[in-house]
Every structure is written in C-alpha cells, then in structure tokens.
C-alpha cells in the first residue's frame, strides 16, 4: 500500500482528494478544482502541494494538460488485471475480445476490475487518448454522466458518457470531443464504469 506517513496533513488530504476524483470519474482534478475544494486562493499554493507529491513519488503530471494528474502507486506489485481487449472511443465498433493480463497491480486492486485498451479519440477532452488503458469496474448500472463501456443489442461497444433519456425512449452516448456528435441508441446496456486511466509511455 501507499505509505502516507511521509506526507504532511494537507498533502495527505490533497492526495486523497486526487485519488477520489480519479476513482470516481476516471481522471484527476484541475488545479482550480483542488484550490476551490481546499479554499486555497493561489494556484501557486496548489502547485506547491502537487510538486511535493511528485517529489515523494505519489503522483505524476503531464505538462500542458490541466487534468493529467495520475497516481503512481496504490497497491503492492504482482497482481494483474485481466486485459479483455480493445474498446472503441469513437463510432460504435465491434468489441474486440482477448484474454491477457496487464500488470497494473501497483495502481489498482479490487474485485471486478478489468482493463481495456482504448482505440479512438472521442474521449480526449476527458484525458482518455488513443492507446490508453481504461480500468473498468464491472457493473450493470451507471449514474447519468459517468464514463462507461456500453454494449448495444447488435453487439457493438463503445466508451462514452452515459445519459439515459427516458422521455425520448433512447440513450445518449456522449463523447468528450467537441468535434464529434453524440450517439443515440434505443437499447444499450452498461458493461462497466471507468474508475481509472493508465497512459502508456513508449
């Protein structure tokens, strides 16, 4: 497990806030969100905490990407997550199934977690890019607005935000890319909800 004893109280609180955001919605908070949550008026004050967490090896940040805060470790190494294949983050696409194991035990652990590799760029504004791995908690329900893997009756799967529209008897699958339109389907089911994102760096 992550050793938080090396952190100050506020650093620990910031780390836990980042962790909660990544687990609940799949990507980290902005500097502004952190400042607002902790009533830190200056962005520099937030950055001091983030730099401290980086120095202590608990997070990584990508320059010029406001939400690109990632956890470096959470659980002991050695446990793997099933890599079920690839999921389209674009138009609806046939789900590609494969059975491999991805060693992400250092980042995520828990029952009903699997990994899928992303293909496409429809979720780039949620910091999910082509080639990334999304960590999925298998479940059959989702709250409106959550990022899910959805499967249609035709066996096509996609990674999108989930918005049921019962008044219109349809489901809106919303991309996070201003250049793309939502997908509307009459029937779809949730295969799982995204709880984390891992970026492959070659």
Image (tube, rainbow, N blue to C red):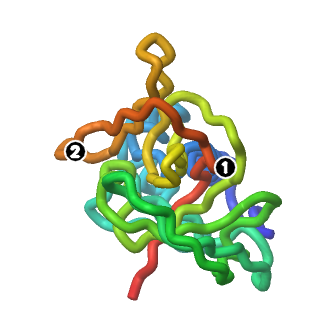
Residue at 41% across, 82% down: 201
Is 10 situated left or right of 62 in this image?
right
Q: Is residue 60 visible?
A: no
Classify mark 2: residues with Cα within 10 Å, few (<14), some (14-19) or many (20+): some
Residue at 53% across, 33% down: 37
Question: Quick one: 113 or 78, which is closer to the camera?
Answer: 113
Residue that label 1 marks: 16
Q: Quadrant of the C terminus?
A: bottom left
Residue that label 2 marks: 180
Question: Quick one: 55 or 121, which is closer to the camera?
Answer: 121
Q: Quadrant of the N terminus?
A: bottom right
Q: Residue furthest bottom?
A: 202
What is the distance, in whole Å, between disc 2 and disc 1 at their CAs? 34 Å
Is 180 situated left or right of 84 in this image?
left
Label 1 residue SS = helix
Residue 15 in the image: state x and y as whole percent. 62, 54
Vertical relation: 90 (above or below) 120: above
Residue 87 in the image: state x and y as whole percent. 47, 63
| Tag in front: 2 or 1 | 2
């Amino acid at each position: 497990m992550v050793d938080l004893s090396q952190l100050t109280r506020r650093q620990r609180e910031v780390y836990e806030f980042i962790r909660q955001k990544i687990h609940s919605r799949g990507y980290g908070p902005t500097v502004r969100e952190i400042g607002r949550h902790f009533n830190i008026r200056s962005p520099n004050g937030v950055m001091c905490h983030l730099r401290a967490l980086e120095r202590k090896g608990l997070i990584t940040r990508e320059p010029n990407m406001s939400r690109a805060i990632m956890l470096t470790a959470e659980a002991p190494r050695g446990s793997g997550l099933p890599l079920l294949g690839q999921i389209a983050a674009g138009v609806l696409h046939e789900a590609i199934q494969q059975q491999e194991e991805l060693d992400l035990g250092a980042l995520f652990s828990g029952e009903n977690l699997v990994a899928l590799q992303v293909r496409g760029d429809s979720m780039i504004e949620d910091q999910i890019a082509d080639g990334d791995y999304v960590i999925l908690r298998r479940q059959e329900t989702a709250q409106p607005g959550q990022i899910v893997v959805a499967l249609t009756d035709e066996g096509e799967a996609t990674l999108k935000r989930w918005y049921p529209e019962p008044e219109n008897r349809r489901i809106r699958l919303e991309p996070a890319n201003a250049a793309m339109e939502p997908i509307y389907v009459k029937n779809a089911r949730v295969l799982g909800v995204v709880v984390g994102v891992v970026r492959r760096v070659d």
